[in-house]
Image: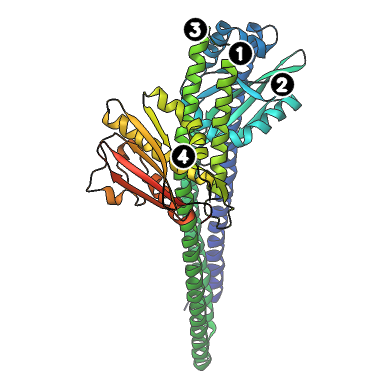
Amino acid sequence: MKNPTTKIKAFYVFNALAIGLLLISILLYFFFENTKNKIFHINKQANIEYVTSLADNLSEDIIRAAKHDLYLTLIEDDILKEYVESDLKLFVTTKYKYIYLVSKNEKDFVLLADSSRNMKEKQKLYHLYKLSKKNNFKKVYQEKSSLYLKHNDKEAQGASYLKPIIVNGLVEGIIVVEFSLQEQKTISFELQTLENMFKIALGFFSIIFIFIIWFSFTDKKREGEKNIAFKNLEIETKKVLELNNSLETKVEKEVEKNRLQDQQLVQQSRLAQMGEMISMIAHQWRQPLGAISATSVNINLHARLNTLDKDTAINLSDKISEYSQHLSSTIDDFREFFKPNKEKKSTTYTKILKSVLNIIETSITNKNIELLQDLQCNEPFNSYPNELKQVLLNLIKNAEDVFLEKETANPYIKVSTYKEGKKLILEVADNGGGIDESIIKNIFDPYFSTKKQKDGTGLGLYMSKTIIEKHCEGELLVSNNEHGASFKIILGAEDE
């Protein structure tokens, strides 16, 4: 028979080992957490130290090159500007991928020098960071100190470093370095994987610890129990408790499962609405962005030919401002798109067409597309002018895309307005060869597009039909004529 004292010693040694194993696992986990935080800190400091050194070198070089007013110097001296931009470009890498110089004039901040000629890249960066940049520029000017910004946008995965160029105690400009944090994200992912492994190990050791404690306890208890009836009662009580706990756990799991399913449905609905809205906005922004690009080329051409007089410069800059205001108003239009309480306004087809042509006429002219107008109806009607502009803009742009795709000779777009009975009609026709009869009945379906290989979303015509028929209480019809396709917007007159 075993000595009771030996049993007691073995019991305590066994439990001490289990507790020691659990404590070591916990200490290892917290040590790992501390090490992980240090790695993140060191990585961040390394980024800041490098970009600080980079910006300091650029600042010193720019100050040496431009010995007086930085804004006027770079605006007036093209050779110096090219030198500064070349200097910025020298420091561009796959990580530090965009560097530019910003200065403040009397009204706002302007771009003085730029390390990239890639318009698509610059537009993407402007879209990601535009909401925060202006206030940050003001802060650098006020505090005369550098600013490090880590972008929270998941799509950005980057950071910005803003370095003021200070001459005689005044901020002459700001060097902005946009750099990628993909390396830090990779480190974070690998550390997170290791952390998950630690958590699994900790959970495993915790289960072993609980099992050892439970086994030791039940073994000791079993040795001391002599009353069979009491033991059976205790076993039955334990079963009842385990059953209750099991039922409670099942109920909690089902409740949690239902709650998560509800949240997922709500989230999916929100994401679907957001995705559709973003696609629509992107579709409507293509035209004014193209017009801005064309106007910029026009300014550049006049400047190179020394024909950029004051009136031309004012006219072209006014156009760019108008296009930019349209981009902003498009956001407001889409924000109001699904609201049922919008107020109708009195307008005419002529006013709507004039507003649209202010945006798209430059693009049409540059592509040698002839625009024919036959405006016989100037009768007012009540509707939503902004939404009608979007529809007309979309119809004209679709015709333009067809010409480019089919390489149509002598392309033209004809916009006609006329009245039939009490109905006011605006017709957009082209000579692009028309729409295949096998698909013409599907072109208003959502996500149906004949331009998918050219970034077609299939939302433009679907959105247009929704606006005309559900919001404006009219009709949007399509047919083929002798030379191409014809779209008709049919609305009621104001007295109706």
Q: Secondary structure at mark 4?
A: helix
Q: Mark 1 or 4 closer to N-term?
A: 4
Residue type at mark 2? Answer: Glu
Residue 277 image point, x, y percent: 48, 48
* Cα–Cα span, label 3 and label 4: 33 Å
Residue type at the position of mark 4: Gln
CA–CA distance in space, label 3 to label 1: 14 Å
In front: mark 2 or mark 4? 4
Report the disc number at residue 310.
1
In front: label 3 or label 1: 1
Q: Which residue is mark 3?
A: 305
Q: Amino acid at mark 1?
A: Lys
Front residue of 108 and 39: 108
**Residue 161 appears left or right of 223:** right
- Provide residue 305's location: percent of width, then percent of height: 49, 7
Q: Is residue 168 above or below residue 333?
A: above
Question: Do residues under tags 1 and 4 come within 8 Å of each other at their CB atoms?
Answer: no
Label 1, secondary structure: give it. helix
Q: At x 32% / y 44%, what residue is drawn? A: 449
**In this figure, which colouring scheme has been used for the structure?**
rainbow
Q: Nearer the viewer, mark 1 or mark 2?
A: 1
The answer to the question of whether label 3 and label 4 lie on touching residues, with beta carbons closer than 8 A, is no
Q: Which residue is mark 2?
A: 106
The residue closer to the viewer here, 115 or 13, is 115
Q: Is residue 471 above or below residue 228?
A: above
Per the rendering, the mark at residue 284 is 4
Kindly state the secondary structure of the residue where label 3 is placed.
loop
Asked whether disc 2 touches disc 4, contact meaning CB atoms under 8 Å apart, the reply is no
